[in-house]
Image (spheres, rainbow, N blue to C red):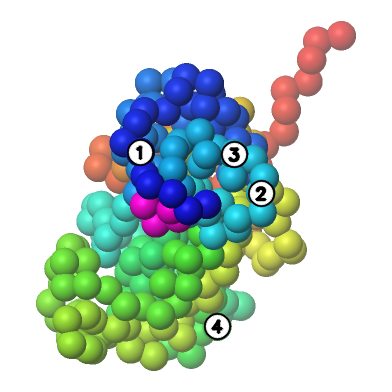
Amino acid sequence: MLGTVAFEKLSTEDFKWLQSWLKDCSAIVLEDGRKFVAEKRLHGLLWKHKVTTFKDLCHYLRQGTHHDLTADAIEAMTANETWFFRDPAYFELLRCSVLPGLIKARQESRQLRLWSAGCSSGQEAYSVAMLLKGLPELAGWDVTLFASDLSQRQIDRARRGIYTREEVNRGLPASMLTQYFQQDGIVWTAKEELRSRVQFQTLSLHEPWAPMPAFDLILLRNVLFYFDESTRLELLWRMRKQLAGDGCLMLGGLEKSDLLEGYELNGNEKSWVYRRTQWAPVAKAA
């Protein structure tokens, strides 16, 4: 794999193959008009892995034996863009409406199960953990916060809970920074009391899942746009099955979907949540 990196463009043939390969291994759709984006994101891999050309890169990906290269290629083609308390209106909806409603409904069991799906480097999961910690009515409750991502490297980073000054300055209130993080040189590390509240695990959303408990709340935010319509619809139905009978699903701020049979929409013009409802297919006329 050693060689001098060439500054070249993806051929149409190699781009078509990359589109098919990426969808097969991750269900991520790389649209026809995004060849330039693929070139830009993958070019760094040529330098990192000492690959000479994009054609050679595709060759090694076809072989499937260079696992670090495969992982890097998939990760390069996902944005992995996240920040603390992303879309504040949604966290306000969680704090003021969704969580109080679930807490009221779970008074007997005193259990709460939440899932941050597609959590990237962990900022969303930690934001939810800090929000839960600030609710005194949950004292003494059995609360599970599960967080997953396709990328093992992102999950490893999330578990460590180490963030740059730029990252903690993006959305994290100063009071929470000093309460839940400690400064280690030029980075900030989540304290153990925060890290211990989140269970991070690698999980591919488009593949079969190991058995999991029913969740009261699933955060599937800014994930659906990676997939085609049929994959989105299938994933939404699988999420519905993974929800408790009155559980809630929250999508990203730009992901208001018309593919949500079996849910009812609650919220306002700034933020919304989908609550699982009873649903049965309409019987066909004889």
- Amino acid at circle 1: Ala
Q: Which residue is mark 2?
A: 64
- Amino acid at circle 4: Asp
Whether residue 259 is visible here, answered yes or no, is: no
Which residue in the rendered view is the most extreme toward the right? 286
What is the CA distance from the residue labelled 4 to the residue labelled 2? 42 Å
Q: Position of residue 270 (x, y in %)?
A: 25, 42
Q: Which residue is mark 3?
A: 59
Query: Between 186 and 264, which is closer to the camera in this rendering?
Result: 186
Whether residue 234 is visible here, answered yes or no, is: yes
- Amino acid at circle 3: His
What is the CA distance from the residue labelled 1 to the residue labelled 2? 22 Å
Give the residue drawn at x 48%, y 53%: 2
Q: Position of residue 159 (x, y in %)?
A: 45, 77
What is the CA distance from the residue labelled 4 to the residue labelled 1? 55 Å
Q: Position of residue 78 (x, y in %)?
A: 42, 46
Element under label 3? helix
Give the residue drawn at x 55%, y 83%: 142
Q: Mark 1 or mark 2, which is nearer to you?
A: 1
N-terminal of the pair, mark 1 or mark 2, is: 1
Give the residue drawn at x 39%, y 35%: 38
Query: Between 283 and 259, which is closer to the camera in this rendering?
Result: 259
Element under label 1? loop
Element under label 4? strand
Q: Which residue is mark 4?
A: 142
N-terminal of the pair, mark 3 or mark 2, is: 3
Region of the chain picked out in magenta, as a range = 46-50
